[in-house]
């Protein structure tokens, strides 16, 4: 279990591009694959988190999830959600059982 907290922002195209999270997770999964090749038993891998988990230590700005939650409209009750690039990437990783780690 691990993950990367970052100050994710909605891009001009309205999407959340987080290549830093993809690279972080890719490197960890590659190391897991090496450990398995070396004979380590792996029961599973669980990244932080599906939906944005907000770091209170960082003033509620650092995000950890694959799904961005729009907290700007919190008072309006929308809390709109959007899958980040890393979420689409991780979906592919899961579907390939870790075989496809490309962007």
Image (cartoon, rainbow, N blue to C red):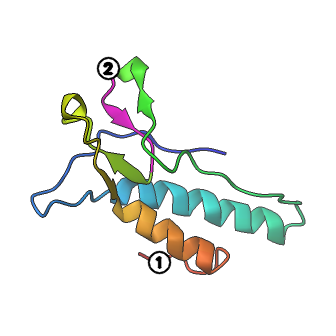
> Would you say 17 lies left or right of 6 here?
left
Question: Residue 22: percent from the left, percent from the top?
Answer: 44, 60
Magenta stretch, main secondary structure, is: loop
Between the residue at mark 2 and the residue at mark 1, the CA separation in whole angstroms equals 33 Å
Question: Residue 7: percent from the left, percent from the top?
Answer: 29, 39
* Rendered view: 18 above or below 33: above
Q: Which residue is mark 2?
A: 59
Q: In the rendered structure, which segment of residues is drawn in magenta?
A: 60-65
> Would you say 32 lies left or right of 27 here?
right
Question: Residue 90: percent from the left, percent from the top?
Answer: 51, 66
Q: Residue at x 71, y 61 (%)?
A: 32
Image quarter for residue 52? top left
Q: Is residue 62 magenta?
A: yes
Q: Which residue is mark 1?
A: 102
Question: Residue 102: percent from the left, percent from the top?
Answer: 47, 77
Q: Is residue 88 magenta?
A: no
């Amino acid at each position: 279990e691990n993950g990367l907290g970052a100050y994710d922002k909605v891009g001009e195209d309205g999407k959340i591009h987080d290549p830093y999270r993809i690279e972080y997770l890719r490197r960890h999964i590659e190391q897991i694959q090496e450990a398995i090749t070396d004979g380590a038993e792996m029961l599973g891998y669980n990244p932080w988190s599906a939906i944005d988990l907000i770091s209170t230590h960082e003033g509620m700005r650092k995000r950890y999830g694959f799904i961005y939650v729009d907290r700007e409209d919190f008072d309006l009750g929308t809390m709109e959600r959007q899958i980040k690039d890393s979420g689409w990437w991780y979906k592919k990783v899961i579907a390939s059982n870790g075989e496809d780690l490309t962007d």
